[in-house]
Amino acid sequence: MITKRDLHITEVALRDGSHAVAHQFTVEQVRNVARGLDEANVPFIEVSHGDGLGGSSLQFGRSLFDEFELIEAAVDVCQRAKIAVLLLPGIGTQRELKKAAELGAKMARIATHVTEADVSSQHIHLAKELGMETVGFLMMSHMTSVGKLVAQAKLMESYGADTVYMVDSAGTLLPHQVKERIHALRESLDIHVGFHGHNNLSLAMANTLAAIEEGATRIDGSIRCLGAGAGNTQTEVLVSVLDRLNIETGIDIYKMMDVAEDIVAPILQQAQEITRDSLVMGYAGVYSSFLLHAKRASDKFGVDARDILIELGRLKVVGGQEDMIMDVATDLAKRLNS
Ligand SMILES: CC[C@H](O)CC(=O)C(=O)O
Ligand SMILES: [Mn+2]
């Protein structure tokens, strides 16, 4: 049974949602959303390019505004909330992490593919030296066995991470699979276990509750579902459900609803929902951040985005291999026209 516990929510719309708006957040938008979240008493707010610090590039998509300007704006308006940044080693560097810390970011989330935790060592150590709360973030965690996931998490723990997250990047895991993974992590680690879900199969909430039941104490959500693919566990809904379950988050439910409706909804070009393409990502186990890339490739080559996504799932393409999306679309177009 779920009981009251020390549960911390990290709001990821200003980072994961960057994928959904093609990295076009403005300083003004970040300022307004961060201020509202701070007033609602959200403890951690993540701000970075969708692919983490240093992600603004042709390969991943150029940001409209320098991410350091966005981080600075968020730090500036927050009285209580701490600003978190995401960093994928190889995309972001130590220099960017240091700069984020100088600007006032207090939490570093070091993300690797689920089988590559060893590349997080340097950055986890640096984040700790910088005095940041440090999270190891194991992405695409459906792509390995429970035993290997635990071994990778233990590596991050050994580097000094305060928390390790099990990340369902593709929104493909089912609640019993989340339970099994979180249970195993809780049994083997002495640090906090976190869960980050995507809603491509409409299971983000069920998976989050399953994770909490198994002892996850660090949970991500995106307000108004503003995250990659069909978005993440919807924060204002999660906070309301947790309140019904007598699980204390300290977050003001009405204020969250107002921020969602009055500040975040107007930013969205279209409502975040489970479309045929995001559904296919969950179904085929494809990285949620591939959605807009696949749509662009679909428009360019006249191939159904679902076929592209299914093929990417079959090929087990992972983050950092975005160039493969155009390759796959070209091959499919050739087959179609031959
Ligand atoms: C490309 C980084 C990715 O968006 C991180 C994340 O939120 C996930 O894997 O779900
Ligand atoms: Mn995500």
Image: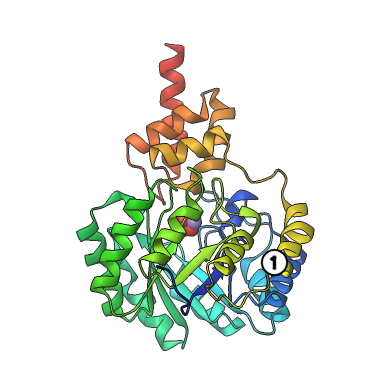
Q: Nearer the viewer, residue 224 or 332?
A: 224
- In front here: 210 or 290? 210
Q: Is residue 219 above or below residue 107?
A: above
Task: State the image coordinates of residue 25 (x, y, percent, origin top left).
Answer: 69, 58
Mark 1: secondary structure:
helix
Please report the residue visible at 53 percent of the width from the left and 35 percent of the height from the top.
Answer: 277
Left or right: residue 179 versus residue 49 is: left
Determine if the C-beta at disc 1 is less than 8 A from ligand 2.
Answer: no
Name above or below for residue 88 compared with residue 310. below
Say left or right for 50 vs 259: left
The quarter of the image holding the C terminus is top left
Mark 1 nearby-residue class (10 Å; few <14, some 14–19, many ≥20): many
In the depicted structure, whether residue 78 falls above or below residue 324? below
Image quarter of residue 106: bottom right
Instruction: Judge whether residue 48 can be spotted in this image.
Output: no
Is 271 located above or below residue 216 in the figure? above
Which residue is pictured at 59% across the width and 66% down the height?
Answer: 239
Q: Quadrant of residue 213?
A: bottom left
Q: Which residue is mark 1?
A: 256
Can you give x and y, in whole percent of width and height, for residue 42 in the image? 62, 74
Q: Does residue 133 appear in the picture of this structure?
A: yes
| Residue 108 image offset from top left, x and y in percent | 47, 75
Left or right for 56, reference 72 = left
Q: Nearer the viewer, residue 338 or 39?
A: 39
The three-letter amino acid code for the residue at tag 1 is: Met
Residue at (31% x, 74% y) in the render: 121
* The N terminus - image quarter: bottom left
